Image (cartoon, helix red, strand yellow):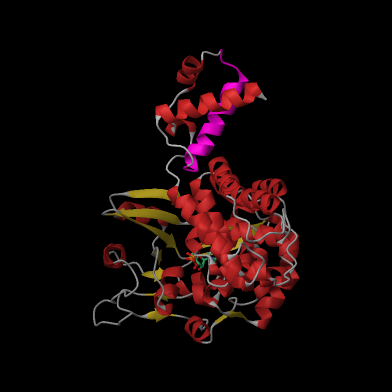
């Protein structure tokens, strides 16, 4: 961030977002109120990380803010927050406030508006998140947030136990920030977590999962997991799985997976915990994963289980038909994900399919032109007619077999070849 004479230049924020948010601040200033950028955007800019949204804090009461801009959403007016819409950008503008009387370690029962930005910063979780910056580039950093960032440590504002008692999710945020930024946790802040960890049970699993997902897709998920276990937070979750923190080669495969494929990272974690796909399905429901995420993860684990059953101890085993059958059952995307998982296992030294076998499976996957009955060049009715037989359960079985052979490239996917093969199968079957 460069401090200019008149206004600051954001280096890590989208230019349009920075300009529009500056306009919001300027408007508030012109009407005689104080206004600053605050929280995560200030922290990320200082750290040289991409700024994803820009929050504003102001001395103006929410109803005043709402009256100064043509397009606003009264997001949480009683808590002082108004969302200002400015040429396609949305900014949360919150009145300087202090909070009190926390109910269930989640929500403040009352908020009081205050006239001073420093008081507002005092109610925030960590020193690095309790900084504000003005339009002219003036820093408001009363608790040494920049110094803590320079020392690469997370430290609570004031007394850690109090901050965590106010909102128990902050304990998970603390570990998430430490894990994602590669920071340490200041000793008193860590002690605060140990003292308050029982209050985690007040927090909805959904909010914990969302933090946990950031840990899992971050650069050091294993460090995050390990801190989570060591702090005792892990065992206080509503649906913990039996992660012991034991660092085996399956776990060390997790960071080798591109975070874009988070579901593979989750599958590895669950496999490392020796959880079967069915139990994983239940657990992931408890973790409030979406159906899509859950299916992606479970599908990968099922492929792993089925593949181990097929190949047994033979890690070089690579028969084509069982593989194609697996791909047809779970889909090409999951099969591709499973190959990535195998590759990562291979590089981490865990028992995995041999690299040559893996390459062969990948080639077969690539070659597969058809994936489902609707891709088959013959229909059930056409088979019934060509074979002169009445429909029945045999038809589904036959279609499945034709699909398998055509997908494996062992017969051509054209009507004539498929009908010929069907006749051959039926003849063999009737002859036996
Ligand atoms: N439990 C919380 C959540 C948030 N905050 C304050 O509210 C700001 C905005 O919170 P949020 O947008 O949830 O998170 P960020 O800190 O911006 O970080 P990230 O976007 O990475 O979640 C934080 O910086 C912090 O000052 C807090 O004190 N306690």
Q: Nearer the viewer, residue 289 or 300?
A: 300
Numbered marks: total:
0
On screen, 387 above or below 34?
Answer: above
Residue visible at 63% across and 71% down in the picture: 252
- In the rendering, at what x and y percent does residue 37 appear? 38, 69
User: Residue 157 at what x, y percent from top left?
Assistant: 58, 76
The reply, left or right, for residue 42 in relation to residue 327 is left
Asked if residue 430 lies in the magenta stretch, the reply is: no
Q: Is residue 397 magenta?
A: yes
Q: Is residue 124 above or below residue 285?
A: below
Residue 228 found in image quarter:
bottom right
The image shows residue 258 at horizontal and vertical percentages of: 49, 65
| Res. 254 in view | no
Q: Nearer the viewer, residue 241 or 358?
A: 358
308 left or right of 43? right
For the view shown, which residue lies furthest in the front direction? 431
Most distant residue in the left direction? 6
User: Is 255 in front, or is 111?
Assistant: 255
Q: Quadrant of the C terminus?
A: top right
Q: Quadrant of the N terminus?
A: bottom left
Query: Which region is colored magenta?
Result: 390-409
Q: Is residue 233 visible?
A: yes
């Amino acid at each position: 961030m460069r401090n200019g004479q008149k206004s600051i230049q954001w280096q890590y924020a989208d230019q349009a977002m920075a300009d529009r948010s500056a306009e919001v601040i300027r408007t508030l200033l012109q009407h005689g109120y104080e206004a600053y950028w605050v929280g995560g955007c200030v922290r990320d800019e200082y750290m040289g990380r991409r700024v994803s949204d820009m929050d504003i804090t102001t001395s103006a009461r929410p109803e005043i803010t709402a009256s100064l801009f043509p397009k606003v959403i009264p997001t949480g007016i009683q808590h002082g927050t108004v969302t200002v819409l400015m040429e396609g950008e949305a900014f949360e503008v919150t009145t300087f406030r202090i909070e009190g009387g926390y109910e269930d370690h989640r929500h403040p029962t009352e908020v009081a508006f205050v006239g001073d930005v420093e008081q507002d910063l005092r109610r925030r979780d960590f020193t690095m998140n309790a900084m504000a910056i003005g339009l002219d580039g003036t820093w408001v950093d009363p608790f040494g947030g920049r110094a803590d960032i320079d020392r690469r440590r997370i430290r609570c504002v004031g007394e850690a136990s109090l901050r965590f008692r106010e909102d128990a999710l902050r304990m998970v945020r603390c570990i998430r920030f430490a894990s994602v930024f590669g920071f340490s946790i200041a000793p008193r802040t860590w002690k605060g977590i140990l003292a308050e960890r029982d209050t985690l049970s007040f927090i909805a699993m959904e909010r914990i999962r969302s933090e946990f997902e950031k840990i899992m897709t971050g650069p050091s998920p294993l460090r995050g997991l390990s801190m989570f276990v060591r702090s005792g937070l892990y065992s206080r979750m509503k649906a913990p799985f039996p992660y012991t923190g034991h660092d085996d080669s399956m776990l060390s495969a997790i960071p080798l997976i591109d975070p874009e494929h988070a579901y593979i990272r989750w599958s590895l974690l669950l496999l490392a915990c020796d959880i079967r796909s069915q139990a994983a399905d239940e657990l992931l429901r408890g973790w409030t994963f979406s159906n899509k995420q859950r299916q992606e993860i479970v599908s990968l684990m099922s492929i792993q289980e089925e593949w181990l059953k097929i190949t047994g101890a033979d890690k070089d085993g690579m028969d084509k038909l069982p593989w194609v059958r697996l791909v047809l059952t779970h889909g090409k995307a999951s099969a591709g994900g499973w190959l990535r998982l195998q590759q990562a296992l291979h590089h981490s030294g865990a028992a995995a399919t041999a690299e040559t076998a893996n390459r062969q499976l990948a080639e077969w996957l690539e070659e597969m032109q058809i994936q489902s009955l609707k891709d088959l060049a013959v229909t059930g009715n056409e088979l019934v007619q060509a074979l002169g037989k009445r429909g029945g359960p045999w038809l589904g079985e036959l279609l499945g077999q034709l699909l398998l052979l055509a997908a494996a490239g062992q017969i051509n996917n054209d009507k004539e070849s498929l009908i010929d093969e069907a006749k051959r199968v039926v003849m063999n079957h009737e002859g036996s």
